[in-house]
Amino acid sequence: MMQAESILFLVTLALYFVAMLLFFLYAAIKKPSVAKYAVRVQLFALLVHTAAIVLRGILMGRLPMANQYEFSTAFSWALALVSLVFIQKFRFPVLGAFASPVTLLLAVYAGVQKLNELKVIAAGGVDSIRNLMPALRSSWLGIHVSTVIIAYGAFGVSFVLSIIFLLRDRMKENGFWDQHIPKKEKLDTISYRCVSLGMMFLTVTIGIGGIWAENAWGSYWSWDPKETWALVTWIIYLVYLHLRIRRGWNGRTAAIFGVFGFLCVLFTYIGVNTLLPGLHSYK
């Protein structure tokens, strides 16, 4: 079954790559039929990815959300899902040309973690990754990780929309890009909705994490690097929402903030795990 799960993940990587190429081709030749194929391939990739995650859970006998590979693959899955939802909801296939490379890069990062995991299995067997440390044997695991995955996925789409917003002025009036990319006001609104969604789930994540930490480590907050940077990320997006709601803050400055916020998300996940190991350092 481990081999089957690995094969499904490799197929997922290949499909995300094909979807990205099709979105790029759509942007290049500007044919709506290509966009339809790109969306279908990404949807199929998402289904295969879901099957790989489900099989992983069956193989592990637990929720597949406990180590670097499992969280990485779930992160890329969430971004693929949220971007697909927004592509369909707003009839915005050009979003795929910007979101699919980010999804693929996160999936490739998961692939690197997968290779590291296979080395661990080769040395100690499947039980070396199947058995969780005591702190992770909790009913809070599924809720805590699921909410942060949705939050990160929403922030990822906001990041992509912010990039498009910043490039919008360079697009020719009445050209293909101008016709198929929403106006800046709509991009700004969609990005704001993504941040609002992400903040709601990140707030739940931190709250549940505190309750779980008290049960596992005897303290609601330990200033662990992951906790600290999650708080930094939460404060950044809170400032964004506060200034937008109370001061009417939007436009280019908000887009720059959206890019910066997601860079903090990436550091909270990848940077902290690599450079600042702590209580949340699960391999």
Image: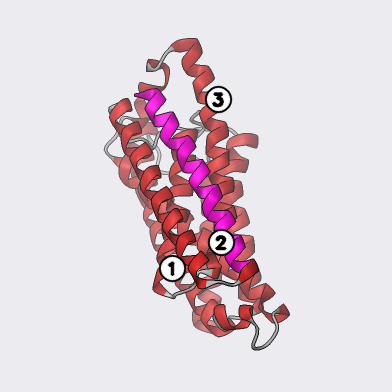
Quarter of the image for residue 113 reads: top right
Q: Which quadrant is home to the N terminus?
A: top left
Lateral position of residue 171 relative to residue 161, left or right: right
Lateral position of residue 172 relative to residue 187, left or right: right
Query: Are there few (<14), some (14-19), or many (20+) residues within 10 Å of tag 2?
Result: many
**Distance Cα–Cα, label 2 vs label 1:** 15 Å
Q: What's the residue type where badge 1 is placed? A: Phe
Lateral position of residue 203 relative to residue 192, left or right: left
- Give the residue at mark 2: 23
Q: What's the residue type where badge 2 is placed? A: Phe
The spot of residue 175 in percent (x, y) is 65, 83
- Give the residue at mark 1: 86
Query: Closer to us: mark 3 or mark 1?
Result: 1
Q: For residue 174: magenta? A: no
Work out whether 169 lies above or below 29: below
Disc 2 element = helix
